[in-house]
Amino acid sequence: MSLLEVQDLAVEYPLARGLVGSVGRRPRQSVHAVDGISFTLERGELLALVGESGCGKTTTAQTVLRLVEPVRGRISFEGGEITKLGQRQLRPLRRRMQIVYQDPYESLDPRLTVRAAVEEPLLIHHVGGSKSQREERVREALERVELTPPELFLQRYPHELSGGQRQRVAIAAAIVLEPDLLVADEPVSMLDVSVRAGVLTLLDRLRAGGLAVLMITHDLSTAARFADRIAVMYLGRIVEEGPAAEVVANPQHPYTKALLSVVPRRDPRERMRPQILQGEAPDAVRIPPGCRFHPRCPAAIPACRQIDPELRPEGAAHRAACILVS
Amino acid sequence: MTLLALDDLHVWFDLGEGRELHAVQGVSLELEPGQRLGLVGESGCGKTTTVLGLLGLLPPSASVAGRVLLNSVDILAGGEESIRPHRWTDLAIVFQGAMNALNPVQTVEAQIVEALELHGRASGRAARVRVGELLEAVGIPRDRATRYPHEFSGGMRQRAAIAMALACNPSVLVADEPTTALDVMVQAQILELLDSLCRDFGLALLLVTHDLPVVAQLCDRAAVMYAGEIVEQGPVDALFHDPRHPYTRLLFAATPDLHGHDALASIPGSPPRLDRLVEGCPFAPRCDRAFDRCAVQRPLLRELDAGREAACHLNDVLAVTA
Amino acid sequence: MSVAAREPGAVIEQAPIRSRPGIVWQAIRKRPSAIVGATILGVVILGALLAPVLAPYDVHEQVGPVFGHPSWSHPVGLDDGGIDMLSLLMWGARVSLLVGFAATFVSMVIGGTIGVASGYFGGRTDTILMRITDYFLVIPDVPLMIVVAAIWGPSLFHIIIVIGILLWTSTARVIRAQVKSVRERVYVKRARALGAGHTRIVWSHVLPQVAPLLIANTVLTIAVAIFDETALAFLGLGDPSRVSLGKIIENAFQRAAISTGAWWAIVPPGLLVAAIILSCSLIGGAIEDALNPRLRVAHLAARSFRLRPLVGRGSEAV
């Protein structure tokens, strides 16, 4: 049984119609942020959801935590369905699913010390008995995120810490309850390059300890290095998924191929053969018929305009949603 | 003849109460016509301040020293008065986040026309024709000229900002983090655009960024900045394959590569505060190869081979063997 | 946004001010106008509080002729009943300040609650509460106060309630805007994701950010409340048994102080009211200014960067 199972998840945001539209009874349009995706996540696995802006990866992450409501689909956590649970019933579950946000400068309440920030989850969920017991857990969490010695950091305020340290504090606050699932939304994109590896390695270490990590990122190189599996999203759908190394070495979907080809390489001698797609992804309101990628696809054939492909081959570890994939 | 040269540029910011932030500490660069130079560094290293200083766009709290030589003439000597005539006409800049700084209540065409009229290049109908040319050069269809910025996507707005920068045919284009907020595919489009513009118009490009791979692919040479100064400068190939400063080496090692397999490096600690005088090498506390001399004596930027320089005691063979 | 978008340049991150007294005190300390205002207000409040002890004469006792001139023993002269003006002013300020503070308290409680509820919950709650606020906003203050005072009877309690009910609208709007913006901050979203309940979020994360603004708004509201009370009293609608500064003016006015040339019966109380209102405005304004993000107008400044002659090495040195 997978820790997290998502089936045919869809999230829509209705667009305001305006006065003319309402009066004229124009059909209500929606942004199809997530349009039917399915995936699983196991314990101790790091799944990277990659894609460009507007592909729905952040919305997916927030929906999994029920911070956003889906319009259809199922979310199962440890076998139990959580799609329709009320906020009150979700509370105990929130202990087991945590999130780390992108912006380390805004993630922490500037008025709370590190100690208070990491202790807060314990107080919210009434965990950890006495004050000294809670302090013990806070120290442990700080040590796990390598902010050692903890005494040095407990009384500090966020503005006294660097970006990397702040992000570690945010991670500490997320793991102090010992969750089973951690959603990391672009955890290092706002950190300096020299600091990223430290935080990513930390996430990797936590993963090795059994934590399931759902990482949202636009950085394919990071995903290639740290993820066990990669799922590439485009316009609300997963267009390719599989073991990270395989997806990167042997991409099947034309979008993945193009995306990988334009990632700048750090070795100046690496001859790049970028396949630059023209234009940008259309907005998620008017999704193209058939395969949603066909207007920009360099390998499109007439059938692509009619057929909306499923991920195939079915049951395989590495699949792509393209009719040209056997 | 060197098109643009910065000679020992310093920038201080007044922090009040007698304190100063020494943001740029003696930066010297050279840019030949048609050359692409990358100015690389992490946040706070002073790269943006350097280019703002070179264009004279610093606030009143800033003091500047040094020379900015445009075709061997020091345009910094007379302050704002001597720099202004060259702004946009010789030296143009695409600011960081320029795509979000377009005037939302003016059409894109109107904004570029304004640049042309301000510098007396064209007006009225002739200006609009020129705008059409510029937009086509950056890949925006002419008929979109009369749209408003919010009707454009991020990538298109960035192209518009580039078109605006090219309005007066500058010889140097400074681009500060031109692709940072963009998706990787759009980034590739913009980089390709910059590449072709430099070739077609003979533009020299000064690319400021923290993104090493971008510099590795687009630029011929790069200067690595740390704590307000340049610690290494040279051809990008040499910087990657034969770095002569530990920071350069570590920075590359900390950058993940799509197909790389070696362990990613991270650099412990933080850059030094620039409101205090630093003794010795500013990178020493974080350096994995520091030795006793590093904490006491500040290494000078020295020329190693033709076109390469680095500020590190390790290059001083005598020091190592002593 | 990325790493590079945060390049500090000349910015060294400031410690955020963590306590409410902290920001208020700092805001006042840094502005001369606010210091003046705080001083004046302090003196007045002190005088009003200590009136029973400090007032030189009893305010019910005639100590001289009607409209007696100012003299050494009566620095502000005597009023229409021969009562010492200085003592009257002290006792009058007491009442005026009482009404001002009490009415403001009422308004702050109502406005603050509605503002927080509206901003935090949004949606229908917000719409309904804002409609209610709009209705109260369009009611003309003074006519309503007159009507209510006329119907209900002019007791101090009623005056306080009436003023309070009319003043909360601006507070509600200001607080609502701030709460809405704080609610979107990442650390608030994080707290929700952690499973924190509404109470906790509002108490620990939202209110601390809203409090300084609430204080600024409160101080400014006090000024308006005192003005309203003075106006009411002057129109004869004040509580006849409690003499506020407005009542003092009204009395003098009714008893022909002007035609007898007894300026000391009208001007000093008027000045005192004005001084209180001005002080509150200065203090409140100073706090508001302190809370506004500083506008970066560097590029619009007439001066530009300065040049410094370089001493020592140029490019020749190695």
Image (cartoon, coloured by chain):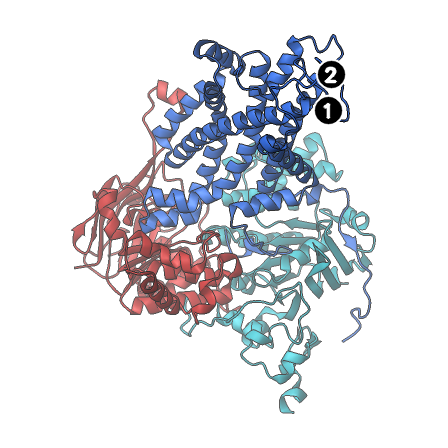
Q: Residue at x 30, y 51 (%)?
A: A238
The residue that appears at 63% across and 91% down in the rendered structure is: B321
Image: C82 above or below A153 = above
| Residue carrying label 2 | C68
* Label located before the other in sequence (2 or 1): 2
Using the image, determine if residue C107 lies above or below residue A84. Answer: above
Q: Residue A111: give x, y in percent of width and height.
A: 48, 52
User: Could you tell me residue A11's position as x and y percent?
Assistant: 30, 41
Q: Is residue A239 left or right of residue A296?
A: left
Chain A, hue in figure: red
Please name whichever residue, A95 or A117, is drawn nearer the observer in this view of the structure: A117
The answer to whether any part of residue B138 appears in the image is no
Chain ID at mark 2: C
Which chain has been coloured cyan in this picture?
Answer: B
Specify the amino acid type for callout 2. Answer: Gly
Element on which disc 1 rests: loop
- Is residue B126 depicted above or below A177 in this figure? above
Residue highlighted by disc 1: C74
